[in-house]
Amino acid sequence: MRNALLLVTSVLTIATGCGSASTALENGGMGSAGASTFSGAGAAGLGTSGAGPGSAGANSGSAGTGSGSVEQGLPCEVGALLQKYCVTCHSNPPIAGVPHALLTYANLQIMASSVPTSKVGALAVMRMADGTMPPKPLPGPTAAEQATYKAWVDAGMPMTACGTGGPVDPYATPVQCSSGATWKGGDRGSPLMHPGGACISCHSSGGDGPIYGVAGTVFPSAHEPNDCNGASTASAGALSVVITEANGTKHTLPVNSVGNFFYEGTIGKPYLAEVSAGMAVRAMVHSQSSGDCNGCHTVSGGTNTPGADPAPGRIMAP
Ligand code: HEC
Ligand code: HEC
Ligand code: HEC
């Protein structure tokens, strides 16, 4: 985890130096509201909400020129909410089946796909309040976090500088082996073997490997090479993988010291999967029928099932 955090810091440093993002902010011209953190701007914005939507509209043109995964223009509190609850799916590009990125100011100004009369940023207020975003079983923002976000939307989404940058795309990381340790045992049978490799496809192509219903590897970041040891813990505690069969039966699988997990038995397909550590969860939204997790969750992402959507990269610890 420590490596992943260091990496995030370096991505931030690069992107906050980006000229177009700061130019967009200057063009925004929000005066004192724009310069202060949102806690202040929100209170002011609520009193003068009539003026808000106009200036927000005028800003959106210049905001659209930002390019990187990090772009200033969102109040710190708004960026923090999106980072914590939304960007694992609303990344850039969004993961399969998700309509928009939620990383930048410009992203929030796009008209929504499901409600074309509403901006994505405004629709988010409703989708959080009715409990449909983030989708179950993921934990959603607290009432206080939602209230701060709503106040910013009610104020007309004023462009606001957050000195530490905006949300970071969790998939915009380089190929790296975070653990620094690799499997060197070749095809010698072991629960620690070939982390990141397609366990089921190799075991079923001959040899004496056990036949699993599901098997795979959890990593600390999105693009880790084959044979790199993954993770058994995250900051919130020991990892486990929960598989929910089509009929609702759940299997909680331990994640071993190299991130590998496996279940020797049949899984009713299609199934849903999530990775959890304490209360922290990452969940696969769509059900899958191949139990060979690493066959799709490769170093760069992909699919092992014709017609199925490609995974965004490795299975990551929450
Ligand atoms: C686990 C993946 C996932 C997470 C996490 C997630 N979303 Fe979504 N979101 C989706 C999917 C899938 C859709 C499309 C289906 C739908 O509208 O329900 C969607 C749609 C939306 C839409 C409708 C967009 C449109 O153009 O119609 C909004 C708004 C939205 N999400 C906001 C959020 C916010 C805000 C968060 C964080 C608080 C969040 N989502 C977290 C998966 C996710
Ligand atoms: C490139 C092929 C290949 C891949 C990929 C692979 N295995 Fe294996 N595995 C084997 C072979 C071959 C054996 C049997 C070796 C033997 O009998 O010594 C085996 C045996 C095993 C065994 C049995 C060990 C024992 O005690 O007898 C376990 C457990 C195992 N694999 C787990 C995994 C897991 C988990 C993964 C995925 C993360 C995986 N393997 C990926 C080839 C592979
Ligand atoms: C056929 C390809 C495929 C297989 C097999 C597959 N996945 Fe996925 N996975 C995806 C796709 C596509 C997404 C992104 C869309 C979604 O969440 O449904 C995803 C997303 C995820 C996510 C959420 C991503 C994030 O970072 O928040 C988790 C967790 C996950 N998968 C775990 C698993 C586990 C565990 C297995 C094996 C039991 C597995 N997947 C097998 C394709 C696959």
Image (spheres, grey):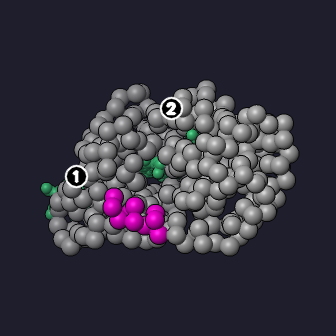
Residue 67 spot, x, y in % from top left = 67, 67
Residue, x 79% and y 36% (percent of image)? Answer: 49
Q: Is residue 160 visible?
A: yes
Report the side of 127 relative to 144 (left or right).
right
**Residue, disc 2:** 142
In the rendered view, would you say 165 is above or below 271? below
Q: Magenta stretch containing residue 2, yes or no?
A: yes
Q: Which mark is residue 267?
A: none
| Residue 294 image-quadrant placement | bottom left
Residue 282 among those drawn in magenta: no
State the extent of the magenta-drawn residues as a range: 1-10
- Residue 102 position, x and y percent, is 63, 50
Amino acid at pointer 1 = Asn
**82 vs 259, nearest the viewer:** 82
- Viewer-closest of 292 and 8: 8
The residue carrying pointer 2 sits among few (fewer than 14), some (14 to 19) or many (20 or more) residues within 10 Å by Cα, namely few
Residue under pointer 1: 256
Secondary-structure class at tag 1: loop
